Structures are given as structure tokens and as C-alpha cells.
Amino acid sequence: MKDVSLSQSLLLRTHMKRAMSVVIAMSLAVGASACLAQAQLSAQFFGVSTVSVSDGEHTVMTDGFFSRPDYLRLVLGVSPNESRINRALAAGKITSLDALLVVHSHHDHAMDAGVVAKKTGAIVIGTRSVANIAVGSGLPANRTKTVVGGETIELGKFKVHIISSPHSAKPVFPGEITSPLKTPSGIVKYKEGGNFSYLIEHPQGRVLVHASANYRPGMYSGIRADVVFLGIGLLGKQSDAFIRDYWQEVVQTTGAKIVVPVHWDDFTVSLDRPLRPTGPLFDKVKEALAAIGELAAADGVEVRMLSQFQAVQMPAPR
Ligand SMILES: [Zn+2]
């Protein structure tokens, strides 16, 4: 989250083409893996750090952020956009969800959770602040589950491990949301409330969604993952040493062989349009992707860039 203005938004667009060409260059052939085969575990991307993981019977989703309000709305106040939510769920062929796993309560993760839960039957899992956003959207409190980190929740064949994880450096809007949040609401009211990563374990594979580009040393010791959805927001502004340590803590330690960068896209752009990288006024996406690409090549890890609604199929069970 950053402060923005309309003039900055225009400037941002002038840099769009150059940044996008980097993303395209980094893209691998995802088409073949993008179709959802039934009963095979797959993880589908929806921009920022919204990822659904499904075995064809049960589906869990991180965040569920689809409204993606533009800069004007960020200034005037945001509220869930039902038509955008409906279109995104339809495009992703999401008809029901067992759980929404919300990483933290900034608007670009949590603002739609209550509305998406009402539409899909999900329970909302997250901090007390996340629960207050969902309840403010009219979700009954008993459809929320407040967690503090360290819990494991079983849903069908899924075991969801909730892991305390620091927000990326210099987080904005610290603090907690202590009562149900009514909308429209200024984005400053979407206080961070604490951050989680989610390890989504299934007999067919393990998906780690680590949305915020920061780490606690040793946080994944003894934990394995097949695929990491790796937050790179603001990572390009960090030192080479930080990026190396981040890679080591989150990717090397878990042994993941596929890394899908997330939180690189401009979250003010509707999902009706192609994702584009956050502009250089706010982030250094190109630099982050270049650094990740080098580390991945050295480790024999595949970096896969996904567009909205594309999916990764899990590697064959071991
Ligand atoms: Zn945040």
C-alpha cells in the first residue's frame, strides 16, 4: 500500500510497457498447465496474493481480493465491488469455497473476504482484524474463525497450517481493527492486524502461499513445500543480501521446485484487463524478478509467471 495521486497514476502508465515486457520475457509456457484437470490438485492465481487451491472436491482460497479499486476510490473510500467479484469468481470457475485464508487486513487482501464468503459458503480465517472486516460486510460472526498462528485446520483432504509471518518492511497502517468495519471506508482504516503465511497441505502436494516479502529466520525449518507462491511486493527495493536471505528462508528451506511470484501486479487495475506490474514510482518489480530469476537458475527452481485465472498443477505425488 502506498499513497498515490492521479498524476502519479498517469506517470505510472508511461512505464507500463517497459515493465510488462520484462514480465512477458520471464513468462514460461503456462498454457499447457493452465487447464484444470478434474481431481488433480491445482492452484489458480487471481492477482495480488489471491490463490485458490482445489482437488476438485474441496477448494480453499487465500484473500479473495477481486474489487481492485482504482486510485480515485483509494482516495475517496473503498467498498466491495459485487459485479467485479461475480465476474472473477465466474472466470475462475469458483462456485463454492470451504475457506478463505486471509493473509492480513490491508484492503488489497481482506476487503472482499466477507462478500466472497457470503457468495461461496466459505468460512473466513484470519486475524481478529480480518474477522471485523468480514462481519462489517454482513457475514455472520460464526462464519469467521480468528487465528493467531500455529493452528492447523482440516478441510476435506486439506490440512491448512497457519504460520505467523512478518509483513513486508515498513508496513503502512499498523494496528488492529477492533470493531466491524463499515464500507465505504478509507484505506487507512484497513489496519494491518498481523500477517500469516498459509501452508496448504494435501495428499497430492503442498502449496505455500507466502504473500508478504519478509521472513522470520528459521520460520520454515522442517517444513516442505512443492510450490511457493512467493510475495515480491517491495522486494526489489531491498538489498541483494536481504533478497538472498529471503530466498534461502522461504524457497531453499522448503525445497520447493516451482516458484510463482505474487503481489507484483498493480492492484488498482481491474481483473477484466491484463495484469500489469506495479509501476516504478511505487516498486521495483523488474529488479525483484531479475534477482529471483538468478537465484532460481542457480538452484534449479522453475519460476512461473501466471496471469489471472491461470493455474499450476501439482507435481506428481511422491
Ligand atoms: Zn499489506
Image: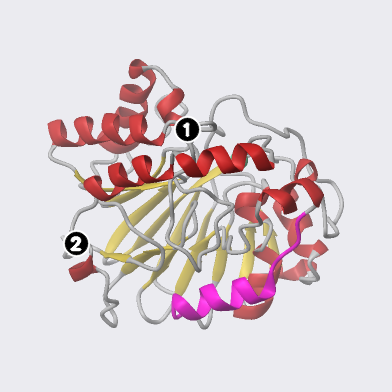
Query: Can residue 195 be seen in the rendering of this structure?
Result: no
The residue labelled by disc 1 is 280
Question: Where does the C terminus fall, quadrant-wise?
Answer: bottom left
Main structural element of the magenta stretch: helix, strand or loop? helix
Q: Name the side, left or right, on which 188 lies relative to 277.
A: right
Query: Can residue 58 be seen in the rendering of this structure?
Result: yes
Question: Where does residue 172 sit, x and y in percent of width and height?
Answer: 68, 32
The residue labelled by disc 2 is 315
Name the quarter showing ligand 1.
top right
Question: Where does residue 257 sit, x and y in percent of width and height?
Answer: 20, 47
Q: Nearer the viewer, residue 283 or 249?
A: 283
Q: Name the side, left or right, on which 211 lies relative to 22.
A: right
Where disc 2 sits, the SS reads loop
Q: Name the side, left or right, on which 218 lies relative to 118.
A: left
Where disc 1 sits, the SS reads loop
Question: Where does residue 253 sit, x and y in percent of width and height?
Answer: 28, 34
**Residue placed at 19% from the left, 54% from the top?**
28
Q: Which residues are magenta?
A: 78-93
**Residue placed at 39% from the left, 27% from the top?**
218
Q: Nearer the viewer, residue 113 or 142?
A: 113
Near mark 2 (Cα within 10 A), the count class, few <14, some 14-19 or many ≥20, is: some
Q: Nearer the viewer, residue 197 or 156?
A: 197
Above or below 39: residue 175: above
